[in-house]
Amino acid sequence: MKRMKAVSVMLTVIMISCGVLAGCSSGNSSDKDANNAPASGNAGSGASAASTVKLDIIETGNNLPSPDKDFIKKEIDKAIHSDLNLTVYASGDDYKNQLNVRLASGNLPDLFQVPDRASLKQFVEQGLLLDLTPYMDKLQPVKDFIGDESMKKTTMDGKAYAIPKAPNIPYNTYWIRKDWLDKLGLQPPATTDEFLNVVKAFAEQDPDGNGKKDTTGLTGSKLSTFAPIFGAFGVADPNTFYVKDGKLVNSLYDPAMKDALGFINKIIATGGVDPEIMANSGLQHQEKAIKGQAGIIWIDWPNLSKDQFTEQIKKVNPNADWMQLAPPKGPGGQYDGPFDAGGTSGMYAIPKALENNKEKLQKVFDLLNYVSGKDGSTLVQFGIQGTHYNLEGEKVVPTELMGKEAGFTWLYQFTGRPEMSYLQTKFAPQSKYIEFANSQPRIQILNGFLSNPDGYNPADAARFIEEEFVNFIYGKSPLDGYDAFLKKLESTMNFKTYMDASIKQLEELGYGK
């Protein structure tokens, strides 16, 4: 009977298909953060300093050194009297497979990364995860670090089943060739109409001066290219939820969405938009910008301002001058695309079985509290003081060894990191770009809080929505057919069920009431 139950669990969890976020790009972090230990070196309330407890932890990641060279492990073990056994998997698929096998066999780690919200829902329904709600008083340092609102990201039916990482910050903005603007006698566009005119001019007026019509005004990757244009009409990207005028709204049903699509159609009609935006994948749009083929790009700051990319740009054209561009103003305001209040770069769960091992459970709490406090958070961000960084007052000053030896410390940032201060320390030359991206107004969306209902296939719905939106913005379908598109979406994609379930979940979390 036990064997049949294990097989049943395996067959269920093996169906999980969503990826695990572990990298540092497009607004997600590849490093983490955390820590809140008392001056004595113990790890918050309830820390058991007398005994050493072995903790088994698994997650995605890479470049973890062997235990004898892992100075982060040694410092944490010393601080909370543990023996950490961290295992990382470079491939998200490999990680999911290994996690599935362990869950099915009952050999659960003491702390593990949950791939995504869908996986969290699956594990909760199978009774595999510890309900953390009764233990929140023991995790006060964690709550103080990540914020009370963050716990909503891993809450289902009013219960918290995992610890999400501290909030990230937005990375993406439009970037524009200032030297091209100067060549054509133009100012940085401040409105949607000015933006349209610059896109057209960059494609038609030979801004690179080579005598050829070989430049485009705007490039990006898929519909996200137009995130600030949607924002200028007061709507977020397709199929996103937000509160507008006190009510929950899905962008597809926002009356301003048709106006936004109509204006994007005008931009494309200028002939100044990269004709391959819907085919661009990976960093193909970045490559076009670096090669001087486009004058405006929607991209995250690391992929245009890090040293290796600025060097590439200079090799192609030493005079190229890329600057960040504030979102254009439009009839619905000025928003640099959406930012997901429910999004997280990672979440970590504790198996329900651990509630029967009080000593080990408390040690997991000690670990999470430690990496959420001052001493532990600084450790897992930057390494060892005096070796990998020095302090000038409260300012962390990296040494050469930080870059050489501390590239793996993010693997221990189980509760995240204070994103802005961390990035400005690690990427000091890019500090102004980080601040600019973070300071732009964004529409707060709520999709990260949602779990899909049974019978709804998000991949199919997303594909259908994208196909229809492409038809609208390229003029293949008239906008007066937009309502018919919504009806087809509802009738063929079970979208009404998704809408009802999403509204219910968000209202239960206190949104739109």
Image (tube, rainbow, N blue to C red):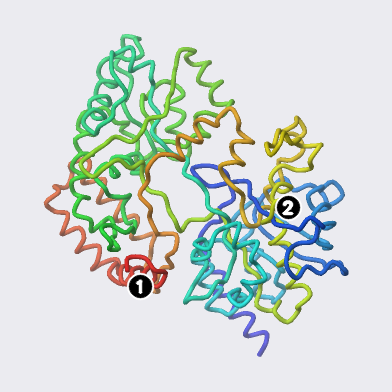
For label 2, the SS is helix
Q: Residue at x 54, y 75 (%)?
A: 124
User: Of circles 1 and 2, which is in front?
Assistant: 2
Decide: few, some or many residues near mark 2? Use Cα within 10 Å; few <14, some 14-19, many ≥20. many
**Residue on which disc 2 sits:** 376
Rendering quarter of residue 197: top left
Percent coordinates x, y for residue 358 in the rendering: 75, 78
Q: Nearer the viewer, residue 37 or 498?
A: 37
Percent coordinates x, y for residue 352 in the rendering: 65, 77
Q: What amino acid is found at the position of numbered circle 1 in the picture?
A: Lys
Percent coordinates x, y for residue 258 in the rendering: 19, 49
Q: Is residue 452 above or below residue 295?
A: below
The numbered mark at residue 504 is: 1
Q: Nearer the viewer, residue 397 or 309?
A: 397
Q: Is residue 331 above or below residue 496?
A: above
Please tell me which of labels 1 and 2 falls first in the chain. 2
Figure quadrant of the N terminus: bottom right
The numbered mark at residue 278 is: none
Q: Residue at x 55, y 72 (%)?
A: 160
Horizontally, residue 18 falls left or right of residue 264, namely right
Q: What amino acid is found at the position of numbered circle 2 in the picture?
A: Gly
Rendering quarter of residue 102: bottom right
